[in-house]
Image (cartoon, coloured by chain):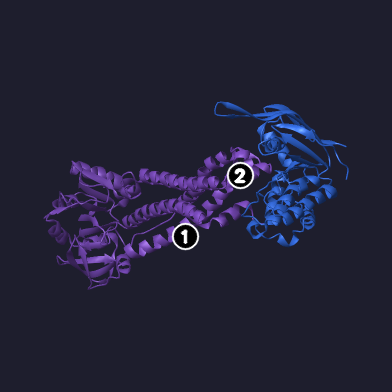
Chain colours: A blue, B purple
Amino acid sequence: MRTILQAENLTKVYRVGSVDVPALRGVSLDVEEGEYLAIMGPSGCGKSTMLHLLGGLLTPTTGSIHIDGEDLTAATDAKRTDIRRRKIGFVFQRFNLFPTLTAEGNLKLAESIHGGRDGKKGGDPERRREVLRLLQLEDKMHHKPLELSGGEQQRVALARAVVNRPALILADEPTGNLDTENSAIVLNMFQEMNYRFNQTIIMITHNPEAAAMCRRIIQMRDGQIVAPGPRVQI
Amino acid sequence: MESLVTANVRQRPVRALVSAAGVALGVCLVMLFTGLARGLSNDLERRSQNLKAEIVFTRDAGSTQLMSNAANLPVKYAEELLKIDGVAMAVPDIRYVSQGGKGFGFEQVEGVDWEQFAAMNGMSLVAGRGPQGLDEVVIDETKARNNKLSVGNELKLFGNQTYRVVGVYTPEAGPRVKMSLAAMQDALQAPNKCTWVYVKLKDPGRAVEMARKIDEALPGNKIQLTRDIITNIEKSIPYLGVFLRTLVGLSALVSGLVVMLAMYTTITERTREIGILKALGASRGFIVGEIVKEAVLISVIGVAAGFAVSFLAGYVIQRAYALPFEYSWLWGLTAALIGLLGGALGALYPAVRAANLDAVSALAYE
């Protein structure tokens, strides 16, 4: 199995006024291609900080992160952005779709950013259709986010994250704003993406049912991994 | 596909329209002021070109080109000029500049012996007769058309004094309203005086030589060649160029500031969206590009609206006040560039600020 993510001894210290607040205290993590991993832990344990570090939105105070062979920590801000563009897809608790664009428009925007300067104009309609079909969004393509239910919005967000086939999807409490029924639908979709495309997913969640669908669960507390759960082959 | 740029503009139509109105204002300022300056200047030049006298003889400090209210030159100079060999005609003239009839712009009135003046310039009456009485004037065809005047109508000059139109002449030359020299002298209480004397030469090709000769014969006066006056009309309006350049600068500033303010507000409103773009891997260049493109789209709408409003306003003003507007491609291009560049540059600061936002803070923005 190929290692998609390798994080070693990550620390992150926030400076609040004149006080140093440690958020991560030496976290190491390896994630293989096709893994579906849940990170659980109480609020303030450093889960979100870790996700932001893995996504290159933050830089660690110490430690290193390699994504699909590229060193994220040694990269400049522009290079980190470039790695994020090519290798990472985000799914947020609050969906974070562009309210002015339709579902399809949101996907096309992601494709356009992913394509960069040399990108194919208009993205790949074939792949877009396939993703929308898998996520049962074909009839919602021309709807704007506010015309969609929470579950549908999160499915669009997932579609946006996977449409470019990133090496890694980072999901931050993707069911946190959804009711039970929609949570189940969205979690099934995550699982479908993982099975169908061998998509590597790291998901932060407080929801034990969501975590139970993952192949590995790790527990965090006080900025450290306290229970690096075993990998499960499903 | 609807791009982020057009979608954003459509999402906030009022904000987009206000921004576009700011750009349009800048374009309007440039187009209307330069159009009016050019229109007035060209109109004056056209009418001056119909004056056939080669030389204008006046007091040394009495005249600024063809616009003066001073009547301090004794009329007897006309007789002296006629004695000089080579002078065919010498026609004394008073020109009076007053505020326009509708309180907008200015209006010139000329006092001149009609028969002599018409003969010198090849003018003829298309209706009525020449002015004789102290309350009679003739007007040119443009004035008659613009003010809907004809023979027998009355018009007010010098404030509240009533004059009767007794004739309509063609072609237009100098001021559009002319009365007899005696009537003008009476109105200005300047008996036997004039502003200048038009000198028509027997041989128009010897104008320079004759000017020198007149200067020698009647020293201490100002002798100008009519052709020099005509080419200098635009330059003769003090600081017109400086005024226009200042106006262009102010217009650019207005356009830039309005767009900057609008885009700055937009960036604040969309902080979270910028965070999302960053999370999706959008580069700084992409974010700056999207914001500048939005500003340019707004500016294009503003420029188009600015041109439309300018042409409409120019037409309305021309109809209402008979002020000529003449637009030039160069000033039109300048106005368009000001609108577009002002908008793009105005958006640059908020765009760079957005591109430098911290992604995590932006995503957490409420």
Q: Residue A73 is drawn in which quadrant?
A: top right
- Number of residues whose C-alpha sits closer than 10 Å to that of mark 2, classed few (under 14), some (14–19) or many (20 or more): many
Give the distance between the C-alpha atoms of the residues marked 1 and 2, in whole angstroms: 35 Å
Q: Nearer the viewer, mark 1 or mark 2?
A: 2
Is B63 displayed left or right of B142 in the figure?
left
Q: Is residue B102 above or below residue B336?
A: below
Q: Amino acid at mark 2?
A: Ile
- Number of residues whose C-alpha sits closer than 10 Å to that of mark 1, classed few (under 14), some (14–19) or many (20 or more): some
Q: Residue at x 71, y 60 (%)?
A: A140
Chain identifier of the residue bearing label 1 in the image: B
Q: Secondary structure at mark 2?
A: helix
Q: Amino acid at mark 1?
A: Ala
Is B106 displayed left or right of A10 in the figure?
left
* Pointer 1 residue: B308
* Pointer 2 residue: B274
In depth, the one of B148 and A14 nearer the eye is A14
Q: Which x, y percent locates residue B49? A: 33, 55
Would residue B53 be seen by someone viewing this image from the given angle? yes
Chain identifier of the residue bearing label 2 in the image: B
Which quadrant: the N terminus of chain A?
Answer: top right
Q: Residue A152 is drawn in which quadrant?
A: bottom right
Is B184 displayed left or right of B64 in the figure?
left
Q: Is residue B346 above or below residue B51?
A: above
Q: Are marks 1 and 2 in contact (CB under 8 Å)?
A: no
Q: Is residue A231 above or below residue B295?
A: above
Q: Which x, y percent locates residue A189? A: 78, 52
